[in-house]
Amino acid sequence: MTVVAMKNVPDTSRPVGSAPVKTAVIIPPVEAPPPRRVSRIEAASQRFGRVLLPPLIGLALFVLVWALLANSSSGLPGPVKTWQSAVEVFSDPFYDNGPNDKGIGWNILSSLERVGIGFGLAALIGIPLGFVIGRVTFINGMLSPIISLLRPVSPLAWLPIGLLVFKQADPAAIWVIFISSIWPMIINTAVGVGKIPQDYLNVARVLNLSEWKILTKILLPATMPYVMTGVRLSIGVAWLVIVAAEMLTGGVGLGFWVWDEWNNLNVEHIIIAIFVVGVIGLLLEQMLMLLARRFNY
Amino acid sequence: MKYVQIENVQMVFDTRSGRYIALQDINLSINQGEFVSIIGHSGCGKSTLLNLVAGLIDVTGGVLLCAGREIAGPGPDRAVVFQNHSLLPWLTCADNVYLAVERVFGGKESKAALKRRVAEALELVGLSHAAHKLPQEISGGMKQRVGIARALSMQPDVLLLDEPFGALDALTRATLQDSLMEIHAGLRNTVIMVTHDVDEAVLLSDRIVMMTNGPAATVGEVLDIGLRRPRNRVDLANNVDYNRYRSEVLKFLYERQKRQVA
């Protein structure tokens, strides 16, 4: 391509017709280089390298360390043995050979049920209570010392009280879930109500909204992100506590299963249970994250 | 006819470092249909004065009257447009306006009539097309328009504007000022606007209230703007009167009330 200097036309890309061209030079239109075509395979492999490769390497290393540890110890089963056992356990998850021998599916479902009931009750009471605490200074003053006192108590310390009151193992386990998962919801909701921007409350005052409208149109939506954080923390705690509670109360459930397999010295099953608890906890967390995104303004 | 009356108003705030007298001896009467601007350096309490008229804060001395009645709290007869639009981000533009309409007219009108009021208010500010968008999906100027639509939809006797265009770029601001002039010409409602923009004050107002610096700020001077309406910003640029008004406000702000540089 030839470019002839034109003294009074600084911008050579200007269309010829509009430019005050003195020396008649026609510049051939610059041919744009063809866009580099990134093949889809290339893009996919790049994404694989960035997103999937690191966790895969991490997992592989984890399994490797596990295998090495298992090799040098007598009791701990290695990854292969555990995998074989897991295939066996999951091939028939819903068998039922009496109260002390049920499939893993039943155990998972019972644990989820207890967490669901305990956590559900906690949400039902904790979120409205958080609203009241956040909205009414007097009640906040009344309840905050009690909450500060009870919140740090280890969840299992509540179990004897539950057994004493309910005289049964199952409600006692649910009680433990309830009492340990209620605090994050109360506290986060109360904080959320306190953090509502003054602007929104001014709007409410200028428009002279009723208390009901303030609640449904301003307080609830504005605190939703905080409430969702509380819910997420709570369900984390609930799932954390369920294994310990079920170990003590017995019955059907992942915690009881772990304890039972310890008594049977079936260590593969204990490891399987650990993974199952981890995976379900992760799924619960992810589900709530998705739900929380819905309330991000 | 005197519509808003501010008599011997004093506003004292109790702060951590003791009593702070924000406003003192404020006397001002505003006629029905009048467009009044309150101008002054930042911190002179002009927003406080507007909040007093809005009823968002309670006065500590003196009396504020609106239509002959004492102002004892916020009311739908005095609508406020906030500087930062204050739209609820989880409601669409139409729903934001509906919230106001429903409160004022919900008792006596059908749902369809309320919806019609919302549509009319949005049309007045030229935003019919954005009715179903969320505030985050529209520009800053459009949000401020929705804020104005929300205030106008209540058919307030007094429209209170707290630096309504302060956060906008110059071009958007000019467009919105023109819209506001048109709306005011059409509805003839009483407007009180707080601003720190001299051109805005001269262009829009019938009267400019100039406030002295705080603490204990008060009304320094009141300037009547005798420019004929409708006003056109381009024509006024070379208007002798316009420039005289403008320089009078500037002289007040930058000579008589020169702000100590901290």
Image: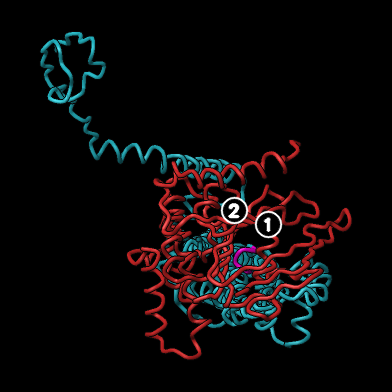
Above or below for B142 versus A251: above
Q: Residue at x 17, y 11 (%)?
A: A3
Q: In this picture, which residue range is highlighted in magenta?
A: A198-202
Amino acid under label 2? Answer: Thr
Colour-to-chain, red: B
Question: Which chain is depicted cyan?
Answer: A
The disc labelled 1 sits on which kind of residue? Answer: Lys
Label 1: state its secondary structure: helix
Q: Nearer the viewer, residue B167 or B185?
A: B185
Question: Residue at (39%, 85%) from the top-left corner?
Answer: B113
Helix, strand or loop status at disc 2: strand
Q: Main secondary structure of the magenta part?
A: helix
The residue where tag 1 is placed is B46
List x then y, in percent, for residue A276. Answer: 52, 62
What chain does mark 1 sit on?
Answer: B
Residue neighbourhood size for the residue with mark 2, other residues' Cα within 10 Å, grouped as few (<14), some (14–19), many (≥20):
many
